[in-house]
């Protein structure tokens, strides 16, 4: 089955990005295809490479990056949500005159159309969040 | 973009300003309108407060986005389900909500109501008939 996963909550504060990650891995292991993982609301905070959790805790951001790399998954941060919350890639830094970037490997910033397209193109859209 | 048309429903369950879900849901609806899908909205639980008229956000220093709902008709978003029990549980009636309308171009642009008041059981049937649910 072709799946799009939407993650609506930030890391560590809320379990839903953990649950989404474990769901994604389980789905891949069962042979399902992940068309896209779309991060919205505070979920965009899953995509900052500047996070530094304690060494005895899971690194949620790195875990996403490794999953994306291992399975060639398209992981998208919503641009409007990212701008509000300070998630920046090279293009956004140039467009908005910011002095730094923080996007982690495997993520890209794009529009809400990517979420709608995920809903249209996939057999299931699965939402993680409150 | 796919030529396939799906029945897509946006479910709104939260009050408008306590969290950003309501506003960022509306942003998805406005962007999604360009995709020419069969779109409907549902307002239930505290989400019914999103549609109340006379919202004044000056005291909390936040943008009052409630006028945007009246533009949905122009985006051909004209199926707006409001759950009756959620209104009643909060002491609200339809009169407390904005009067949302759309123009039917097949009937000489006659103005029609967008809001459909439905019971919890009726809304459950509407949900069951959807292809994609966006839950906010």
Image (cartoon, rainbow, N blue to C red):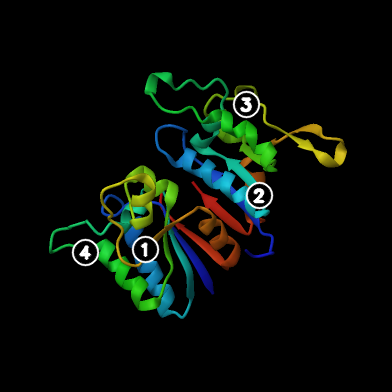
Do marks 4 and 3 both belong to one polypeptide chain?
A: no
Cβ atoms at labels 2 and 4 below 8 Å apart: no
Query: What's the chain of the residue with tag 4?
Result: A
Q: Which sits in the foreground, A88 or B85? A: A88
Give the residue at mark 1. Answer: A107
Sequence-wise first label, 3 or 2: 2
- Give the distance between the C-alpha atoms of the residues marked 4 and 3, in whole angstroms: 47 Å
Where residue B7 appears, as percent x and y from the top left, is: 66, 56
Residue B81: quadrant of the picture: top right
Is residue B124 something one can see in this rendering?
Answer: no
Co-location on one chain, circles 3 and 2 = yes
Q: Judge whether B57 appears above or below B130 on screen.
A: above
Q: Residue at x 60, y 62 (%)?
A: A120
Say what secondary structure mark 1 lies in. Answer: strand
Numbered disc in front, either 3 or 1: 1
Number of other residues with Cα within 10 Å of mark 3, as a class: few under 14, some 14 to 19, many 20 or more:
some
Mark 1 or 4: the one toward you: 1
Mark 1 or mark 4, which has the lower sequence index?
Answer: 4
Instruction: Tell me if label 3 and label 2 are in contact, CB under 8 Å.
Output: no
Q: Residue at x 43, y 32 (%)?
A: B17
Q: Are marks 1 and 2 on the same chain?
A: no
**Position of residue B33 in the picture relative to residue A64 (left or right):** right
Residue behind mark 4: A58
Give the residue at x 37% y 42%: A84
- Which chain does tag 3 point to? B
- Kindly state the secondary structure of the residue where label 3 is placed: loop
């Amino acid at each position: 089955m072709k799946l799009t996963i939407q993650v609506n909550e930030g890391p560590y504060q809320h379990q839903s990005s953990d649950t989404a990650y474990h769901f994604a891995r389980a789905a891949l292991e069962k042979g399902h295809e992940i068309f896209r993982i779309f991060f919205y609301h505070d979920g965009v905070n899953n995509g900052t490479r500047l996070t530094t959790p304690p060494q005895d805790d899971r690194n949620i951001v790195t875990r996403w990056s490794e999953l994306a790399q291992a399975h060639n998954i398209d992981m998208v941060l919503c641009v409007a949500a990212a701008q509000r919350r300070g998630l920046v890639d090279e293009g956004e830094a140039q467009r908005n005159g910011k002095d730094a970037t923080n996007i982690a490997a495997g993520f890209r910033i794009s529009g809400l159309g990517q979420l709608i397209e995920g809903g249209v193109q996939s057999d299931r859209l699965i939402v993680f969040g409150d | 973009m796919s030529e396939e048309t799906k029945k897509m429903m946006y479910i709104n369950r939260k009050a408008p300003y306590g969290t950003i879900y309501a506003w960022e849901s509306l942003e998805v609806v406005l962007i999604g309108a360009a995709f020419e899908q069969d779109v409907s909205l549902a307002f239930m639980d505290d989400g019914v407060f999103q549609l109340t008229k006379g919202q004044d956000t000056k005291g909390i220093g936040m943008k009052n986005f409630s006028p945007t709902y009246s533009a949905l008709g122009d985006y051909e978003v004209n199926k707006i389900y409001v759950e009756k029990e959620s209104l009643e549980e909060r002491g609200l009636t339809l009169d407390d909500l904005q009067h949302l309308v759309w123009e039917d171009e097949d009937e000489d642009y006659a103005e029609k109501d967008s809001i459909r008041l439905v019971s919890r059981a009726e809304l459950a049937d509407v949900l069951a008939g959807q292809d994609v649910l966006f839950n906010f």
